[in-house]
Amino acid sequence: MSFGGLIDEARIVARSLADAAAGALDPTLRLGVTGLSRAGKTVFLTALVQALVHGGRLPSFRAYAQGRIAGARLSPQPDDAVPRFEVETHLRALTGPDRVWPESTRRISELRVVVDFESRGGFLSGSRPGRKLTLDIVDYPGEWLLDLALLSQDFRTWSTRTLLSSEGPTRAPIAAEWRAHLATVDPLAAADESVAREAAAKFTAYLRAGRDDRVALSTLPPGRFLMPGDMEGSPALTFAPLTIPAEGDAPSGSLWAMMERRYEAYRTLVVKPFFRDHFARLDRQIVLVDALAALNAGPEAVADLETAMTDVLAAFRHGQNSWLSSLFRPRVERLMFAATKADHLHHTSHDRLEAILRRLVGRAIERAEFGGAAVDVVALAAVRATREASARQGRDELPVIIGVPEKGQRSNGQVFDGEEEIAVFPGDLPADPEVALRSGGYVGRAAREDGGDLRFIKFRPPKILASERPPQLPHIRLDRTIEFLIGDALI
């Protein structure tokens, strides 16, 4: 291990010892909310905090249902250099008169929730009032998560993989301009800043095109190219893949050497600290996955999502902790995979959505369970935007979902005004997950005016009654999710 690696390990140990000391009498958990861009992390975190602090309809959250939760409150987060997750702002966006989904995360933020509870105790000891659980949660731009896959790839490996993936039928059209420019770049030529900047700009344009809903690609690192934050324009973000020989080293002073040096700087200065500071000490993890968007975009997007999830999760350590490992190199003991936006389907398809997600992340599940981690898969809507009903079509009665589409969307010549409810037959997912993965099999799609497919209608957040204060956010299986992630710490 390098000297820098030893320093990183020492920092992890020091923080773990501090956490252990703080949690000697009462449990402290660090929850990682993991998800790619637009998977719903901000909405999930807002709903989670609202449910813990203000309660709600949570029958599967046993400590709450049994009346053992005395209350919960927000507390100053432990890392003074990390901005606070603005849960109040996000809640106002969801429940205010405009009812809009919160904006995507653009920076790292953190929140601490302290839950006061009564322990059930043992057979002889009885209940123990006055205990507390400290829950630390981190939010971050989903684009940055993609970078974790770079921890195990040098510049040559990353260049080769990126170029190979850009040849696929979905990627090739959006990669054409960048690939044409790449053909004019000589990696053995002298290092030139203007050449590096142009190559990085065209490569970034290709990555941005891959985010379009019609393409819905997931494997698009480096993530900071899409969400640079305060590093925009820095040399560490001014590089691109090159067509380089399979063997040999970069000549000194060459463009290849410049790009390789900047790639390594990106891994050292951006990726490793991000992982060390925010992921290496996780106790619990939920992985949010927008499987429906990939299914609607087609088989290549589904395969791309599977690759992204496998690459990202390989960076984490999942398994049962011993006393020693919890101090020196904590493992993620509980891992939940959540297929978000379950409210876009009728509940009769939720088990099929869970089966598809389980198949998508199968390799990660096997690795985690082999290490002794508890794993669960759930179809989830942290904030439910629709309700269910039945509609008659001829002699048939169809299961439908009802909600208010976001303003400006079109379907069958109709432009939605953002106020009127509509009923939608969401279609069915295939019973066989393999069929869905091969075909992108989401089959309930309405026809768009231009002849294409409307992926799925985007609904506004639900209308909350003015009398409901604090707001009660409707959900699908948020209570089951909370129970799995922290329920065992409240016994």
Image: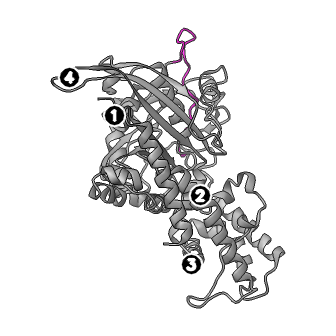
How far is mark 4 from mark 1, CA to CA?
17 Å
- Give, as a three-letter code, the residue at label 2: Pro
Q: Report the amino acid beneath label 1.
A: Ala
Question: Is tag 1's residue or tag 2's residue first in the polypeptide sequence?
Answer: 2
Query: Is residue 465 shown to the viewer in this render?
Result: yes
Viewer-side residue, 295 vs 62:
62
Residue 280 can be seen in this image: no
Q: Residues within 10 Å of mark 3 (few under 14, many from 20)?
A: some
The vertical placement of 442 against 22, above or below, is: below
Q: Secondary structure at mark 2?
A: helix
Q: How packed is label 1: few (under 14 Cα within 10 Å), some, or many (20 or more)?
A: some
- Residue that mark 1 sits on: 489
Return the residue at label 2.
273
Horizontal and vertical percent for residue 312?
48, 59
x and y, in percent, of residue 210 in the image: 62, 59
Q: Which residues are magenta?
A: 455-471
Q: Which residue is mark 3?
A: 160
Tell me which residue sits at (44%, 55%) in the image. 440
Query: Per the image, is 122 magenta?
Result: no
Q: Label 1 vs label 3: CA separation?
A: 45 Å
